Amino acid sequence: MTSSSPEAGSKPAVELPENTDNEPVTWDVVVIGAGPAGASAALAAARAGRRVLVVDRAELPRYKTCGGGIIGPAKGALPPGFEPPVEDLVREVEFTLRGRRRRVRSSRTTLIGLVDRARFDEALTRAAVDAGAALCEGVAVSRIAEQDGGVTLTLGDGEVVRALAVVGADGSAGRTSAYVGVTFDQVDLGLEAEIPVPPEVAAHWRGRVLIDWGPLPGSYGWVFPKGDTLTVGVICARGQGEATRAYLRDLIGRLGLAGFRPSIESGHLTRCRKESAPLSRGRVLVAGDAAGLLEPWTREGISYALRSGRLAGEHAARVAGVAGDGEVDKIGADYHTDIDATLGREMRAGRILLGVFERHPAMLHSAVANLPQGWRVFRKVVQGRTTFADLLERPAARRVMELTGK
């Protein structure tokens, strides 16, 4: 097994040692998955002085179905000094309700940075490599087993590596999520098309995104511009596949984009964890999508991946330094507590807002698109100056929740 070659100008990747005497190579921390959660975990563990290996089943850069919005909480969770490869900076939002009641709102300051996930994930992973992590691409993990105070990982090529701690960041349908026993209480289907457009169309969307509150309960659609390509997508609860596909077709047609051929069409399932679901099992911790950590209403996941990945990497670095099962379990419990106090609190608020949105989409559209106070709240949340959880703790918000039956 060999490490990948980094981009020109970056620190060379750490050489992976060869197996000797048929004994597995032992790492302090192995991170499975090179998305935002995995890269953040690897960077945190490497900066804690641990010997880190990142394994990803694909070769970077690789496509990821994602709107690619970097909102305030995500920007604040980026590593110090890291500059994301931003495709566009958004200061305008066009709101529609099932294609009608159009309203464009503007901000003097940036609301959202838009990234191409392939470039973003690779850049973040290279930052982890610069910090000392090794990277192994194009190899899947086929088996996880804990024994003798460590974790044994069997790779798809048959090689075996050993770790004192593992961070699983391989998605909600990945091996580590199943190993830890993460369960989910919300599953949504997201569909997306990457549509190259001519310069005049790209110019119209530059600096602007669309949010359309959709026709299906809890659904919405979006347009995110990235240079000469528009990312157009919709999301809805799983189980309404044909209706979700029809929504995407209608959205693309309504926007006058049906005549442009998509370069990529993709779909994926997003899964939100049950609040009681575990986040670790022994020396294996999960983060990001593998832990089912994302905002239930907007399904925003990048900031959750970055924040949970950093915490997982820090706790995995601690696990790598202890021997007893009791100490390992204590660190796992600490990780669960830290996640619950931050991301868990935000997810609870998101579930409440999703319920309100499912019943009263027109009310929320009017509040955000037409009322100055609603627009200010939207800006503050997107820019990371407040959270849904903070807002719902205010007396006025509690009264609104009572009136809407939540």
Image (spheres, helix red, strand yellow):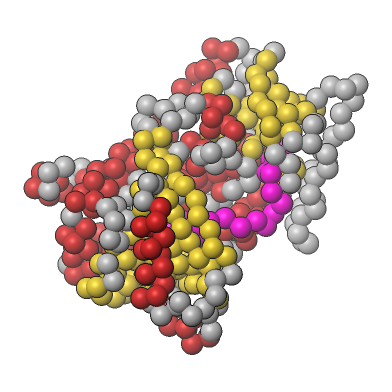
> What is the residue that sits farthest to the front in this orientation?
242
Measured along the vertical axis of the image, is residue 51 above or below residue 72?
above
Q: Residue at x 59, y 33 (%)?
A: 175
Measured along the vertical axis of the image, is residue 231 above or below residue 123?
below
Relative horizontal placement of residue 130, taking residue 284 as reference (left or right): right
Name the one closer to the observer, 1 or 397: 1
Q: From the top left corner, tell me how far across and down residue 233 is, in percent.
A: 43, 63
Residue 127 visible (yes or no): no
Q: From the top left corner, tell me how far across and down residue 135 is, in percent.
A: 73, 44
Q: Residue at x 58, y 32 (%)?
A: 176
- The number of numbered discs placed on residues in the rendered structure image is 0
Measured along the vertical axis of the image, is residue 231 above or below residue 3?
below
Q: Residue at x 61, y 58 (%)?
A: 63
Magenta-drawn segment:
53-76
The question of residue 232 being in magenta is answered with: no
Q: Residue at x 58, y 13 (%)?
A: 325
Q: From the top left corner, tell me how far across and down residue 344 is, in percent.
A: 36, 36
Residue 238 visible (yes or no): yes
> What is the residue that sits farthest to the right in this orientation?
21
Q: Quarter of the image containing the C terminus?
A: top left
Name the one closer to the observer, 233 or 146: 233
Relative horizontal placement of residue 114, taking residue 340 as reference (left or right): right
Relative horizontal placement of residue 276, taking residue 231 as reference (left or right): left
